[in-house]
Image (spheres, rainbow, N blue to C red):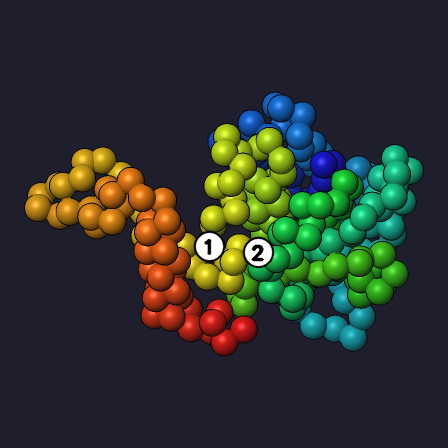
Amino acid sequence: MHIDVITVQPDLLESPLSHSIMKRAQEKGLLTVKLHNLRQWALNKYGQVDDYQFGGGAGMVMMCEPLVNAIEHLTKDGPYDEIIYMTPDGPRFEQKTANTLSLQERLLIICGHYKGIDERIREHYVTREISIGDYVLSGGELAAAVVIDAIGRLLPGVLGDETSALTDSFQDGLLAPPVYTRPAEFKGWKVPEVLLSGNPKIIDEWRYNQAVERTRTRRPDLLDE
């Protein structure tokens, strides 16, 4: 998979993408992420990519021309399956969205900044908008890192055990069940006996029932859906 990211703050993305699973995914050649500083396509020598909004009001807006020039330049290397804009007023990011996007080959992510981007970019170029929650960040970079991580870990061969991602929370509409590791008893706190039984069938049943109960307690809305 290839992901291009347009941003005015590429440094914010370098660290999240340079460690742990995302680092291994890129080293294995399973994921390529390229960061593009929007100021490469700035209007003048001062690096201008934003301007005051029409109609007045606080906050600067990322301009059409630099973004169009960036998008059209990057599209020369091939069409994108999705051009994604990270925005707090987009549909909320969910596991099923990550699953869908992980099946694509080329993605372009636009990170908003300031007061956002000129609406005409959203109307004529953006194919999908994503929010990671009902709050506002200083820019779309951290949100983009979340989306890239969620997508990247689903790519075949990225995780040591590919079945691991299939048992994550939300994959089956449920939260994941409790997990335990050695020792079997610590400070008098014991691991449930069923997990020590060696019987895969009853362990799976226990895990499913625990997942349902945890979901009912913590996220009943998931069961309603």
Q: In the drawing, what numbered circle is on residue 135?
A: none
In the picture of the structure, the residue carrying the numbered disc 1 is: 169
Give how far across and how far down residue 215 sits, in percent: 40, 66
Vertical placement of residue 218 versus 68, above or below:
below
Labelled pair 2, 1 in contact (Cβ < 8 Å): yes
Give how far across and how far down residue 126 sits, in percent: 80, 57
The answer to whether one can see residue 14 in this image is no
* Residue found 81% across the figure and 48% down from its top: 81
Can you name the residue that lies furthest to the top here? 27
How many other residues sit within 10 Å of disc 1, few (<14), some (14-19) or many (≥20)?
some
Label 2's element? helix
Q: Is residue 168 left or right of residue 142?
A: left
Work out which quarter of the rendered image holds the C terminus and state it. Answer: bottom right
How many other residues sit within 10 Å of disc 2, few (<14), some (14-19) or many (≥20)?
some
* Residue found 57% across the figure and 56% down from its top: 95
Amino acid residing under circle 2: Gln
Vertical placement of residue 30 versus 174, above or below:
above
Considering depth in this image, is 147 or 163 the residue closer to the camera?
163
* Residue found 61% across the figure and 57% down from its top: 96
In the picture of the structure, the residue carrying the numbered disc 2 is: 95
Question: Disc 2 or 1, which lies upstream in sequence?
Answer: 2
Displayed quadrant of residue 116: bottom right
Give how far across and how far down residue 102 sits, in percent: 67, 45
Work out which quarter of the rendered image holds the N terminus and state it. Answer: top right
Vertical placement of residue 56 versus 131, above or below:
below
Can you name the residue that lies furthest to the left here? 188
Q: CA distance from mark 2 to mark 1?
A: 9 Å
Q: Is residue 11 left or right of residue 65?
A: left
The answer to whether one can see residue 89 in this image is yes
Label 1's element? loop
Displayed quadrant of residue 35: top right
Amino acid residing under circle 1: Ser
